[in-house]
Amino acid sequence: MEPWEDELLLDDDFSDEEEDAEEQIEETGLEMDADGFADWEDASDAAPVDETLEEALAEERTLELESELEQDEHPRDYNAELEDEEEEAAPTSEKRLKREIRAEALKRLEEAARTESDFLTVVDEWNKLDRNRERRERDHENLRGDVPLEFQAVPDPKIAPLWMNLPRFRQLRQGNFLDIIFSCPYELHELTANRFLSKLFFTISDEQKEVLYYLFVKQYSTTRLAAIRGQSDRNIRKLRMTIQKKLQKRMYEHLSEKLEKNRGLTLREREFMEEYESLLQTMGKDAVIRRENKTKPRKKKAALDDAKDG
């Protein structure tokens, strides 16, 4: 990126029209705060993180309790489906024959498939096997959501120190070194296995890598990052907008090329294409998906207290 482009991105000297527009945005944000709504421009920076995590954690515990109750009321004897020592030592067994017959039947079904309905039948059989596998797994483990492992951890544990339970140390003990080695703004392209995204992150400037890393990977607020970099909060938000616009445009072009070559897209990629195309029709070349604008408005504490009393 040329020096003049950096100055253009980071310049705080706006024209009179831009200054008026910025003042209107700030005034609108203050009015929304007075009415009890979150600031639309940077609502994600002041989101009630603890409340959201507590709700998610309570939901996980509820699912875990329901799973335990279901196992108590309807216990399943999985050992009955396994071969004992005598059956394993025998040349043939009834359970082994059943498994081999089912596997051979599915193999023949796959080889004989010719029409669309035949392939749908094969897919249904595999889905049935997947559902059975997932059911077995649910009886032994409960999948976690987005709640961090260190959330509500004991600040001063007596047996094991807190740092031994942190995700980084647990990754280190398991031998997962890559996320730790490349946890750096300038090695951002090494944190993804997607070849296109890796090349895309590699081509942006170091300054944009820093903003992208701290805002989206480390989840810093724009106010905190502005204090670290010695810039204004408005400056950081403007640079964030520029980065999002650039990356989303390149991603849209890449996915459009995949569609032209009749290559499939994932569900997440299709959702991005639909949302970005709808914004292109209304915003044109300035189209950008801004997740921070979609934070649900929060009620004031006084309003919540009145609702409880009522």
Image: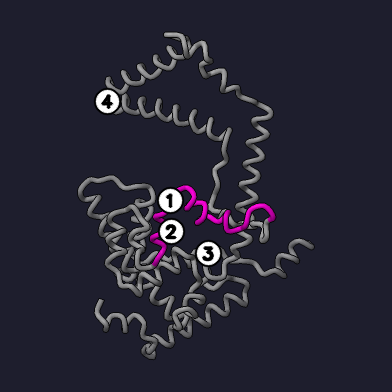
List x then y, in percent, for residue 271.
Answer: 38, 53
Please tell me how crowded label 1 is: few (under 14), some (14-19), or many (20+) other residues with Cα within 10 Å.
few
Q: Nearer the viewer, mark 2 or mark 3?
A: 2
Q: Look at 50% across and 33% down and name the residue there.
A: 134
List x then y, in percent, for residue 16.
Answer: 39, 91
In the picture as drawn, the residue positioned furthest to the left comes out as 261
Q: Look at 40% across and 66% down and name the residue there.
A: 184
Question: SS of the residue at dot 1?
Answer: loop
User: What is the three-letter code of the residue carrying label 3?
Assistant: Thr
Q: Nearer the viewer, mark 3 or mark 1?
A: 1
Check residue 176 in the rendering and tell me which mark sits there, or answer none. Answer: 1
Work out whether 243 lies above or below 51.
Answer: below
Q: Which residue is mark 2?
A: 180
User: What is the three-letter code of the residue carrying label 1?
Assistant: Asn
Work out whether 167 lies above or below 292.
Answer: above
Q: Is residue 57 left or right of residue 43?
A: right
Q: Which residue is mark 3?
A: 295
In space, the residues marked 4 and 2 are separated at their CA atoms by 49 Å
